[in-house]
Image (spheres, rainbow, N blue to C red):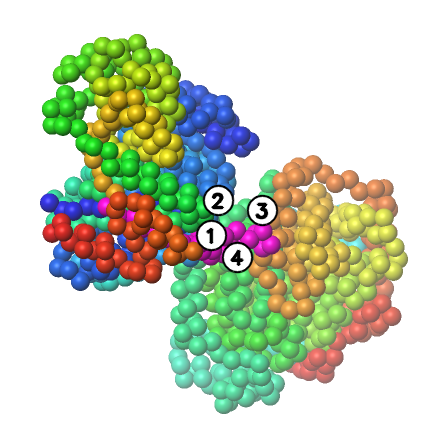
């Protein structure tokens, strides 16, 4: 089985690609077949919006890469096309190639979970990748559900207020650390695509939506809450509706379990600190929350850089927050390893990855 | 196969900029698709719910990009993914600054930037590959002379011109020059397959040249401030052209078929730099380019060979330099090589013709009164040059830049009409090129005190009253109305372009916004300024006209009668060359000085 990790970010310029690049550089010392793809486009020489330089990925001979057709010519690495897929992106079809001569590559991978799953399967089954990095794009995180865990890149580009940033990252860690359901619970709900209201082992009602994003669904849940033990939401749970649910159900949470599909289905729906706050309310009322599938945050990568806008010349330049303060406050707050890749390298991450081989 | 009707949700994530979506909505509905335009104040969750409730097949989101907006859009896509609808719905993004790379980064299925057509959005909705309408957008090389039969409406002027042309042809019949001989030798060199024959022809050629050029053929010595381009530079140039051509998608300046073709002028001294300027101008819509050679080139007997770069203004004419430039041009670009003045006029036209130029430029009156070449010499050379132009099927413009010296329009026009008639007689296709600017004549006599419209209009009306011939306003239009202010310069160019268009002319030459006052190299952004300004002005006026005041017609009649008077005096004088010396087509008092370069070099056959 290949080990697949994603580099997800909380914003643009938080260091996803720098982290990916540093990990690849280190892992090339090991004798493993490395694969690389991304959940969007990354690898431009200058940032699409700020015009500041961006890191590009340097790959060594033998690596397997899944990227869009139009990106192939843009890199300097030599490659051989191994497989052409039917997955189409705005930059053309995704191709699976083998690097035949070291060089830079431009990566634009599949942008949906289902497509990423398909590509990852090809890379592991057809091309025997042992380790795959999935580079992130922007603040997008949803397709990362297909990985075995993510390294969350965050930093001053997301928020220059260090305390706020640390608080948000902590909230993300809490969300991604929610307990997984038991095997029995899994059996009941694993094929469900709509919100289910469950009494012990029986689904007693199925709602119209898979996501909890409307007041009507909240009212339906309230109507049945006394008769049920568990609520399962297979798709999105928005922050607003979780708040609504708390306000509507209140003390009736006692003894009830809320199950969401995975941490991303709840993280995507709002501000993580607010979501954690609502989850606390639920827990304090005696309720429980679990995820169907866990997806761990393996480590946090912090980046003190941010694009500083200059009004004088209508341009961006590199700005930095206090790197020591950022690192130490983050390390203290979160339960996973923290790295500042540019200053400390990625040894911590490499040891972590190596435990899987 | 009939296209399956789709349900398309249009979601403006932007409170203001949803006009693009409204246009696309109309196009989609016309194609039979069902559309639903959401209000601009919907939250992301409400949009997701609307997608689910309406069972939409496709969602088109519009949003203008700024810092931080990308994250908002990324969040929207995450939300769609988490809600489990990402596999069922195609999501496209449109707005300013949106490109395919950005759409990929944001996680959308397609990105539509500025200039996106409804057809493109339709192709996305219908799941087809978008194939641009090749014919509609494609630039086609235009023959400026097409449709003109050169019928003279003013018969008395035609009669006078015929008699003057008879005189010219008679005058040159027993004369030749070193330039004529060099052109003949050059033709043989180019056509010879035998290297030793070429070498001996070169030796013969060099004997007909000035010292500096002879030194090149004898000992390979280059003129000061010139050097050959290196192999590395040529390879790099070749790669540059290939790379640029592979991604060229030139704009079109014209909004209606009545708008004239637009030329720019280049001559940086360096062929590489010239090509970079040409490619930039082509990309921004220029239809034609005009080659400017160094002023010393006009006063030097003979041409060099090879790829030569020059560190001052003007790009050296050699077969290789011109060929390199020609090979870099887009297929639709008109290319003119000027030969209107100087001591190498026949060979310039020969080279232009051999390499495949579309146009050249010949005028005896300007070249000898404002261009510094001896009138007798240029008359003999020009007759041969016009014959080459006819042989290689190259129309040529007859420029009247002696107006810039102070010669009044009616005199300059008389010279232009003489050379045009000479051209017709020799089988050529002349193009009239009146100055379309604030000329010294009107600065003195005041016809432009109120506006720049009437006198320029009068010139065109006058020429139209005389002959049915193509008109190319030069050069550059608006000259001397432009200042160091690039906005002002661009506006003046655009207004002159619009006036020229309103008067129905066939072509115009425009300057860059920094050309008149650059005090140094012309910059590419300043070229784009005037191209964009001209395009916008064409769009603004469309087929509507600029209406001159009654003075235009009065002045048109005055110019026409002035021309007739001048032609009468030239015809009466009996000898065109002598008339040039005497100042009948522009006097010393008016600022026209018969040139001295090549004086006394005409040879009796």
Chain of the residue on which disc 1 is drawn: A
Q: CA distance from mark 4 to mark 2?
A: 29 Å
Q: Which residue is mark 1?
A: A307
For marks 4 and 2 on the same chain, the one whose residue lies earlier in the sequence: 2
Left or right of A334, for residue B98: right
Q: Nearer the viewer, mark 1 or mark 4?
A: 1
| Disc 2 secondary structure class | loop
Q: Nearer the viewer, mark 2 or mark 1?
A: 1
Q: Residue at x 40, y 46 (%)?
A: A12
Q: Which residue is mark 3?
A: B253
Left or right of A97, for residue B353: right
Q: For the residues tagged 3 and 1, is the chain the same?
A: no
The residue closer to the viewer here, B558 or B72, is B72
Q: Which residue is mark 4?
A: B280
Q: CA distance from mark 2 to mark 1?
A: 10 Å
Q: Does the magenta stretch mainly form a helix, a strand or a loop? A: strand
| Disc 3 secondary structure class | loop
The stretch of residues the image draws in magenta is: A298-321
The residue closer to the viewer here, B507 or B124, is B124
């Amino acid at each position: 089985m290949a080990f697949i990790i994603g580099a997800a970010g909380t914003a643009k310029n938080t260091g996803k690609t720098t982290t990916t690049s540093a990990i690849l550089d280190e892992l090339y010392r090991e004798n493993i077949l490395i694969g690389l793809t991304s959940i969007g486009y990354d690898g431009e020489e200058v940032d699409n919006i700020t015009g500041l330089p961006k890191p590009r990925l340097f790959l060594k001979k033998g690596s397997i890469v899944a990227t869009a057709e139009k990106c192939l010519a843009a890199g300097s690495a030599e490659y051989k096309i191994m497989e052409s897929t039917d997955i189409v992106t705005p930059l053309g079809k995704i191709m699976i190639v083998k690097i035949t001569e070291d060089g830079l590559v431009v990566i634009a991978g599949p942008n949906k979970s289902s497509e990423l799953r398909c590509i990852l399967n090809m890379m592991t089954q057809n091309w025997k990748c042992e380790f795959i990095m999935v580079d992130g794009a922007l603040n997008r995180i949803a397709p990362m559900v297909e990985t075995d865990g993510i390294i969350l890149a965050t930093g001053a580009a997301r928020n220059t207020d260090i305390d706020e940033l640390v608080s948000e990252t902590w909230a993300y860690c809490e969300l991604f650390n929610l307990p997984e359901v038991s095997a029995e619970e899994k059996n009941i709900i694993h094929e469900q695509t709509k919100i289910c209201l469950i009494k012990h082992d029986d689904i007693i009602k199925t709602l119209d939506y898979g996501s909890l994003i409307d007041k009507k669904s909240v009212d339906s849940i309230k109507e049945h809450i006394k008769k049920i033990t568990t609520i399962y939401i297979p798709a999105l749970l928005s922050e607003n509706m979780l708040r609504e649910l708390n306000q509507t159900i209140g003390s009736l949470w006692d003894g009830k379990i809320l199950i969401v599909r995975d941490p991303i289905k709840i993280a995507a729906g709002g501000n993580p600190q607010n979501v954690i706050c609502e989850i606390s309310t639920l827990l304090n009322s005696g309720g429980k929350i679990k995820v169907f599938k866990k997806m761990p945050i393996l480590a946090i990568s912090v980046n003190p850089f941010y694009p500083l806008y200059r009004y004088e010349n209508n341009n961006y330049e590199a700005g930095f927050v206090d790197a020591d303060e950022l690192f130490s406050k983050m390390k203290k707050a979160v339960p996973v390893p923290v790295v500042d890749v540019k200053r400390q390298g990625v040894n911590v991450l490499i040891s972590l990855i190596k435990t899987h081989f | 196969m009939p296209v399956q009707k789709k349900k398309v949700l249009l979601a403006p994530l932007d409170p203001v900029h949803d006009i693009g979506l409204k246009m696309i909505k109309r196009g989609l509905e016309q194609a039979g698709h069902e559309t639903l335009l959401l209000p601009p104040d919907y939250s992301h969750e409400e949009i997701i719910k609307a997608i689910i409730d309406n069972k939409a097949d496709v969602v088109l989101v519009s949003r203008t990009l700024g810092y931080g907006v990308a994250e908002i859009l990324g969040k929207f896509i995450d939300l769609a993914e988490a809600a489990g609808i990402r596999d069922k719905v195609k999501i496209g993004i449109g707005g300013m600054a949106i490109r395919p790379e950005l759409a990929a980064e944001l996680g959308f299925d397609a990105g539509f930037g500025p200039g996106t057509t409804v057809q493109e959005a339709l192709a996305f909705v219908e799941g087809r590959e978008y194939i641009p309408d090749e014919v509609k957008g494609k630039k086609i090389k235009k023959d400026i002379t097409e449709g003109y039969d050169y019928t003279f409406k003013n018969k008395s002027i035609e009669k006078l011109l015929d008699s003057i042309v008879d005189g010219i042809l008679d005058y040159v019949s027993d004369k030749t020059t070193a330039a004529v001989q060099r052109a003949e030798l050059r033709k043989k060199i180019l056509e010879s397959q035998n290297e030793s024959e070429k070498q001996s022809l070169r030796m013969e050629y060099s004997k007909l040249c000035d010292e500096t050029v002879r030194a090149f053929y004898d000992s390979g010595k280059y003129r000061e401030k010139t050097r050959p381009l290196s192999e590395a530079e040529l390879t790099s140039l070749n790669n540059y052209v290939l790379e640029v051509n592979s991604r060229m998608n030139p704009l079109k300046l014209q909004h209606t078929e009545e708008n004239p073709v637009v030329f720019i002028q280049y001559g940086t001294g360096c062929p590489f730099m010239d090509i970079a300027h040409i490619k930039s101008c082509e990309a921004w819509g220029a239809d034609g380019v005009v080659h400017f050679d160094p002023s010393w080139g006009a006063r030097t007997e003979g041409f060099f060979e090879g790829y030569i770069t020059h560190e001052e203004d003007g790009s050296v004419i050699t077969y290789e330099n011109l060929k390199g430039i020609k090979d870099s041009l887009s297929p639709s670009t008109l290319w003119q090589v000027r030969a209107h003045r100087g001591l190498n006029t026949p060979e310039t036209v020969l080279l232009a013709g051999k390499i495949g130029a579309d146009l050249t430029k010949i005028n005896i009156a300007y070249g000898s009164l404002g261009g510094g070449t001896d009138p007798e010499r240029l008359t003999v050379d020009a007759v041969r040059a016009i014959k080459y132009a006819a042989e290689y099927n190259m129309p040529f413009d007859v420029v009247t830049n002696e107006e810039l010296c102070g010669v009044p329009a009616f005199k300059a026009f008389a010279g232009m009409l003489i050379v045009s008639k000479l051209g017709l007689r020799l089988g050529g296709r002349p193009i009239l090129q009146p100055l379309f600017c604030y000329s010294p004549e009107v600065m003195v006599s005041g016809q432009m005190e109120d506006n720049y419209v009437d006198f320029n209009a009068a010139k065109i009306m006058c020429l139209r009253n005389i002959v049915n011939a193509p008109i190319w306003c030069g050069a550059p239009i608006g000259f001397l109305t432009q200042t160091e202010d690039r906005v002002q310069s661009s506006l003046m160019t655009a207004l002159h372009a619009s006036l020229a268009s309103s008067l129905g002319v066939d072509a115009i030459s425009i300057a860059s916004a920094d050309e008149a006052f650059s005090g140094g190299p012309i910059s590419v952004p300043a070229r784009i300024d005037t191209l964009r300004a001209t395009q916008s002005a064409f769009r603004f006026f469309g087929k509507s006209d600029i209406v001159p005041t009654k003075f235009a017609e009065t002045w048109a009649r005055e110019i026409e009668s002035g021309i007739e008077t001048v032609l009468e005096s030239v015809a009466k004088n009996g000898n065109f060359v002598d008339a040039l010396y005497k100042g009948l087509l522009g006097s010393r008092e008016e600022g026209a000085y018969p040139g001295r370069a090549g004086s006394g070099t005409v040879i009796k056959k």
